[in-house]
Amino acid sequence: MTKIDRDGFTTNLGVLVATLGSAVGLGNIWKFPSLTGTNGGAGFLLVYLAATMLVGLPVMIAETMLGRTARADAVTSFEILAPRGQWEWKAIGWMGCAAALLIMAFYSEVAGWVYAYVFKAVSGEVSTVDPKVAGAAFAKLVSSPLTVLAWQWVVLAVTGGVIMCGVSKGIEAVTLRLVPLLFILLVALCVRSLTLDGAGRGLGFLFQPDFAKITPAVALTALGLAFFKLSLGMGTMLTYGSYFRDDQNIPWTATRVMLADLSVSLLAGVAIFPAVFTFGFEPAAGPSLVFMTIPAVFASMPGGTVFMTIFFLITAIASVGAILSLIEVPVAVLSERYGLGRKQAALATIAAIALLGVPASLSQSLMAHVAIFGLNPFDLFDFASSNVLLPLGGILICLFVGWVYGFDKTARSLSNHGELNNRGLIKAVFFLIRFIAPLSIAIVLLNGLKLI
Ligand code: TRP
């Protein structure tokens, strides 16, 4: 293997912002509200919160640490860190590449919907509080195969352009300013939403748990979302960790990213559910939910069209940070293991995604009736990645760090070789990684898939 000069993040702020840029994306604005809606509201949120703090955070710390220690791509890192002869661990990295492609196949489609909505917002087509009109506008978009495919390709072309500029320049520059802007717009949306008639019912749906609604399938979806949200279980955080600086405080960075990401999701929830109950939308509408309700909230406030346009624009740009971090996993593997240039690696990855993206994009039109395990390709890719591959990757990462890599090396790495005075914290994190996280993932996964 040839050692190549590794690009990296140049400042501690850059690290934080890029990692946050990976976490914050369509997961907050699109996936979190639609899943909370279809899975019964507050009960789902409760499991999601527990999964994020007790499983997501420790896995994020573990994954980032592995990357920074090995300073290599998701496959090679395990070759470097695993004891001699235990080559099987690198399967985690390959699984991660597969998950990245599956996620990208549907993620780039949803990003395409967002791009399209920037223009729909400008034209005023979606400025309505009427569920029927809003539903029809969404249906018109997703049921025209060529339009959705074209938007997906625009997304992939934009992404390809950015990723070819390299890690620090591309990713840092793009994400540096966007998350705060998104935050401000969401706060404005929340203020409007909280003054609507249905605010009380919306908040009740979001924050008053009905424990009977927490079924094994709901718990698995919440766990899958926790992984998806924090970009865990498939090597994204490992690859980003490999660009971290030696003096970066990993547990603290991870905690801040987790909290910031959670706030964006909660704000999106508070912006959306009051409107759902005020204007008579269906909370369980699924993927279309945000594309109908967010415009409705904007439509009900002064200057709505302008703000709606800005909102979709920022969401579109925020999705770039997340997409870059997904694509970065296979790109790093291809360029570092096989000596491909970053450009060729990015092109090859994007070509593979474009291919897989076709069935995902046609799932609401020409392939709506195709069912594999009862799911259309879009839902299948989502389920297989979020609810199977990511949690599985998470268990394996925990087992690797907790039982193979061991406490001493973990403590050395997470304390930056004794420079940080955080041994108590590391002990607690290690306990979660060694026992609690893998056990709870295993139980939720096996139950959710009806295997036990
Ligand atoms: N976290 C991003 C979002 O919520 C999506 C994402 C980026 C992701 N990288 C990932 C999901 C890696 C899973 C794994 O939009």
Image (spheres, helix red, strand yellow):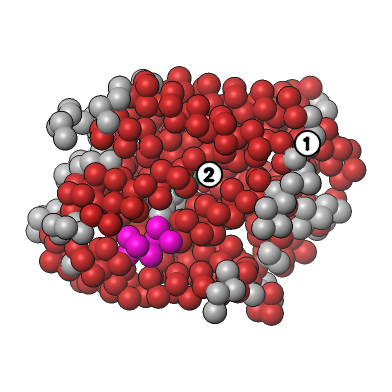
Where on the picture, by quarter, is residue 374?
bottom right
Q: Position of residue 255 (x, y in %)?
A: 36, 56
Residue 52 visible in the displayed image: yes
Chain part drawn in magenta: 392-398
User: From the Cβ of disc 2, is ligand 1 less than 8 Å away?
Assistant: yes
Q: CA distance from mark 1 to mark 2?
A: 21 Å
Q: Identify which amino acid the numbered label 1 is placed on.
A: Leu
Which residue is rendered at x = 53% and y = 39% of the image? 104
Q: Identify which amino acid the numbered label 2 is placed on.
A: Ile
Query: Does the magenta-highlighted stretch encompass residue 372?
Result: no
13 with respect to 184 (left or right): left
Label 1 environment density (alpha carbons within 10 Å; few <14, some 14–19, many ≥20): few
Q: Position of residue 316 (x, y in %)?
A: 58, 31
Residue at numbered disc 1: 366
Q: Quarter holding the N terminus?
A: top left
Residue at numbered disc 2: 103
Nearer the observer, 120 or 340: 340
| Picture disc at residue 189 | none
184 with respect to 418 (left or right): right
Nearer the observer, 253 or 92: 92
